[in-house]
Image: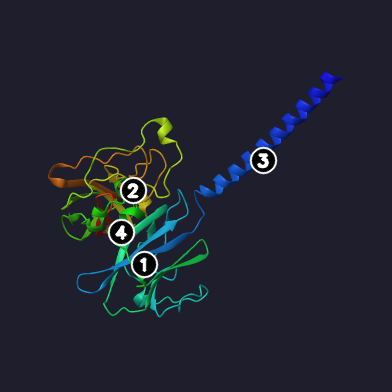
C-alpha cells in the first residue's frame, strides 16, 4: 500500500509538472509570436530629433519602425504618406485628414524595409520655424500614425546621440563622438538616368571618412555558436566602427531590383547571419581601391525608382539619391 501511494504521488506530481511546463511553453510561444511578427503589422513614423545648422536654420531627423520582420511595404506619396505643417497640437486628432497634394512630399521614403530604420532622412526648416510642428502621417494596415517634429529642447541631438541610438562603435559613449564628422560621399554620373527593364546599369560611388572616427578596430561581434545565440546584453543593437557603403531602394518596389554584389542591409536586422551590420557575426568589409564602390543594378519592371546610396562610419552617415526611369 505504501509503495502504491508513492507511485500515485509521483504520478500526480509528474502530471502537475507537465501541466506547468506546457503552460509555460504555451505562454512563451505566444510571447514569441507577438514579438516576431513576420507580416501584416503596421508602420510607425518617427521624429528622431533636431539640431541647428551653421546658418541658423534647423535640421529635423526622421525614421520609422516597421513592426514586421519580413514584410516590406510600398506606400506612395499621397493620403497615406504625407507631411503637413501646422501649429502646436493641431494634428493631434488622428481621425482628421490634413493631406494636401501641394505640400505632401518632403523627401520621405515610399518603400519601407522591415524593422527599425532610424535617422533615415532629414528636413531643413528656417530659423523662424518657432513653435510650428512638421507632422509626418503614415497609414498602413488601416492604422494611422503620426510623428510630430518640433524644436522643443528635449529633442535636440548631436552626433553622439545618433551614434548611441544606432549602436555605433559597439555602443560606445565616448565624448569624441560628439564631434564625429559624417562620411563624404559622391555618386558618379548623372542624378537622373533612364534604363531598360532587364538591362544592367553600372553604378559607382566614392566615399571617405575625413576624421577616421570611429576608426575600424577589427571584429568584436560574437562568433562562436554560444556567443551568437546568447540573448543581447544591451537594449540597443550594436554595430562595429569603420567606413562602409551600401545601396538601398528608397522609392519603388525593391523586390523588382537586384544588386550585384549583394548589398548589406541598411535596416536594423539583428538576426544571426542576416547580412546586416547589426547582425552577428557580420564583419565590416575592407574598403575597395580608391575608396570606390562599384555596383551593378537590374530592374525587372518599368517604373520610377529612387535608389539611395548610404555611406556610414557606423555612427554617422551620408546619403545621396539617384532617380531612375525604367522603360520597357
* Quarter placement of the N terminus: top right
**How far across and down, in percent of the image, does residue 252 sit?**
35, 58
Q: Which residue is mark 4?
A: 305
Q: Which mark is residue 155?
A: 1
Residue at image coords 66%, 37% = 22
Precedes in sequence: disc 1 or disc 2: 1
Residue 224: name its quadrant: top left
Q: Secondary structure at mark 4?
A: strand
**How far across and down, in percent of the image, does residue 308 sit?**
27, 56
Is the C-beta separation of discs 1 and 4 under 8 Å?
no
Precedes in sequence: disc 3 or disc 1: 3
Q: Residues within 10 Å of mark 1 (few under 14, many from 20)?
A: some
Q: Secondary structure at mark 1?
A: helix
Q: Nearer the viewer, residue 42 or 16?
A: 16
Please tell me whether residue 134 is drawn above or below residue 179 in the rendered image.
Answer: below
Please tell me whether residue 129 is drawn above or below residue 19 in the rendered image.
Answer: below
Q: Which residue is mark 3?
A: 23
Precedes in sequence: disc 4 or disc 2: 2
Amino acid at each position: 500500500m505504501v509503495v502504491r501511494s508513492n507511485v500515485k504521488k509521483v504520478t500526480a506530481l509528474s502530471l502537475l509538472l507537465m501541466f506547468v511546463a506546457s503552460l509555460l511553453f504555451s505562454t512563451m510561444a505566444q510571447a514569441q509570436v507577438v514579438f516576431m511578427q513576420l507580416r501584416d503589422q503596421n508602420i510607425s513614423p518617427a521624429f528622431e530629433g533636431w539640431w541647428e545648422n551653421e546658418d541658423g536654420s534647423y535640421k529635423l531627423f526622421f525614421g520609422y519602425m516597421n513592426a514586421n520582420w519580413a514584410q516590406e511595404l510600398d506606400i506612395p506619396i499621397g493620403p497615406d504618406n504625407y507631411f503637413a505643417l501646422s501649429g502646436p497640437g493641431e494634428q493631434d486628432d488622428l481621425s482628421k485628414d490634413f493631406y494636401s497634394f501641394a505640400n505632401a512630399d518632403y523627401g520621405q521614403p515610399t518603400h519601407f524595409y522591415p524593422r527599425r530604420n532610424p535617422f533615415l532622412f532629414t528636413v531643413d526648416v528656417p530659423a523662424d520655424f518657432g513653435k510650428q510642428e512638421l507632422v509626418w502621417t503614415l497609414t498602413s494596415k488601416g492604422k494611422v500614425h503620426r510623428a510630430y517634429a518640433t524644436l522643443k529642447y528635449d529633442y535636440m541631438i548631436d552626433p553622439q546621440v545618433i551614434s548611441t541610438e544606432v549602436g555605433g562603435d559597439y555602443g560606445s559613449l565616448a565624448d569624441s563622438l560628439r564631434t564625429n564628422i559624417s562620411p563624404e560621399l559622391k555618386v558618379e554620373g548623372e542624378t537622373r538616368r533612364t534604363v531598360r527593364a532587364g538591362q544592367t546599369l553600372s553604378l559607382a560611388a566614392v566615399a571617405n571618412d575625413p576624421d577616421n572616427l570611429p576608426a575600424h578596430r577589427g571584429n568584436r561581434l560574437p562568433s562562436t555558436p554560444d556567443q551568437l545565440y546568447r540573448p543581447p546584453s544591451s537594449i540597443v543593437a550594436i554595430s562595429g566602427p569603420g567606413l562602409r557603403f551600401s545601396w538601398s531602394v528608397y522609392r519603388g518596389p525593391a523586390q523588382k531590383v537586384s544588386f550585384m554584389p549583394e548589398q548589406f542591409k541598411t535596416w536594423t536586422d539583428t538576426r544571426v547571419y542576416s547580412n546586416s551590420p547589426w547582425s552577428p557575426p557580420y564583419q565590416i568589409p575592407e574598403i575597395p581601391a580608391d575608396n570606390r564602390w562599384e555596383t551593378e543594378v537590374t530592374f525587372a519592371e518599368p517604373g520610377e525608382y529612387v535608389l539611395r546610396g548610404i555611406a556610414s562610419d557606423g555612427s554617422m552617415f551620408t546619403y545621396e539619391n539617384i532617380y531612375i526611369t525604367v522603360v520597357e
